[in-house]
Amino acid sequence: LFSAVEMAPRDPILGLNEQYNADTNPNKVNLGVGVYFDDNGKLPLLQCVQAAEKTMMDKPAARGYLPIDGLAAYDNAVKALVFGADSAVVQDGRVATVQALGGTGGLKIGADFLKKLNPNAKVLISDPSWENHRALFTNAGFTVETYAYYDADKLGVNFDGMLASLNAAEAGTVIVLHACCHNPTGYDITPEQWDKVVEVVKAKGLVAFLDMAYQGFGHGIAEDGAVIGKFVAAGLNFFVSTSFSKSFSLYGERVGALSVVCESKEEAARVLSQLKIVVRTNYSNPPTHGGTVVATVLNNPELRAQWEQELGEMRTRIKAMRQALVDGLKAAGVQRDMSFITKQIGMFSYSGLSKDQMVRLRNEFGVYGTDTGRMCVAALNSKNIGYVCESIAKVL
Ligand code: LMR
């Protein structure tokens, strides 16, 4: 039965974990996957999560099936966080939200729904984009192409190119946009540039699909989420996938969501009914634990304040690591101006290193980043940064 099955390549991001785990180099550093580690190199278990879990343990609950669209308290907390509790679209019942298996799960529910709705639409992702965007939308049956984004010479966004790509797209094309902390480049567009993107999306009848996996890792929770308000204010119908993997350090719980902004309450009910079919026919309904933890934190003012503080600490430490990386590379003898690293935002730095240099970093020094030159600066710490800088200096 399986004799013709070919060996698939390793996943370009998660596959690195497998290689890293098998590496016996005692100095190895994993800057491959987008995961935040604290200054001791430990994956944090947030205090707010521990407090929420304690309240859950104090009153242990049986584990029945959740509704297909997830825990209502969770879905409502997601809506309030993403759109604002007083937002008219939420108040008017125009947002259909389903709990999803992480941000990836939210993207896939949206992709499957869109494929049924508009099977011939094309999907455009940024050039470059998160490695899994192309694979995910391709596996959902779409033809995936790119819109211009990164400008290697300018070390920033080729915004004119981006607008030109969007202007050239046919009506109905699905545009996957990174709401904040662009993955992999770390370069975001400005609020004024977002206004222009919203204008083109509206004028051309494009379908915006915002991927917001890093809310709170850029400038702040509200600041990073502000782009959502721009699409709402323009009266657009659009998709938002969100994730608490990073912001709650709940990677393994797979807690995310898909929200779809609709024209009316009645339309949102119809859309929700279709999203539920996608969920039901894929995995029936979501798990209870992660959603309950997040809902408990977001719906309790004290725990919520604690979460905001802990997320702020992660954000601040990443910024400090960016500066330490720039300083460390200089101290290690790198001639090239690497100060662009502090202009990038979020968990990643697009380092400008070639595939060969990244492979050398991995094979000779045990420093893991993706082949595209992406490094997770959120995994740097005061102990490994010196070694990382020396290793980069050697391959440069
Ligand atoms: C990443 O880009 O490293 C993260 O989003 C994790 C993943 O699933 O790829």
Image: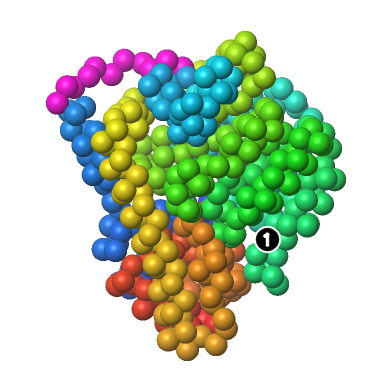
Q: Give the quadrant of the C terminus.
A: bottom right
- Foreground pick, 220 / 134: 220
Q: How many marks?
A: 1
Q: Say whether residue 380 is magenta.
A: no
- Foreground pick, 34 / 241: 241
Say above or below: 350 vs 86: below
Q: Tell me where the magenta segment starts and ends, as one range.
A: 58-68
Instruction: For label 1, count other residues whose C-alpha is less than 10 Å away and answer few (under 14), some (14-19) or many (20+).
Output: many
Q: Position of residue 286 (x, y in %)?
A: 42, 24
Q: Secondary structure at mark 1?
A: strand
Residue at x 31% of width, y 37% of height: 304
Query: Of the residues shown, which amino acid type is indicated by label 1?
Result: Val
Q: Position of residue 327 (x, y in %)?
A: 43, 80
Residue identified by numbered label 1 = 157
Residue at x 57% of width, y 83% of height: 336
Say above or below: 70 vs 150: above
- Foreground pick, 170 / 188: 188
Q: Is residue 130 left or right of residue 169?
A: left
Q: Give the quadrant of the N terminus.
A: top right
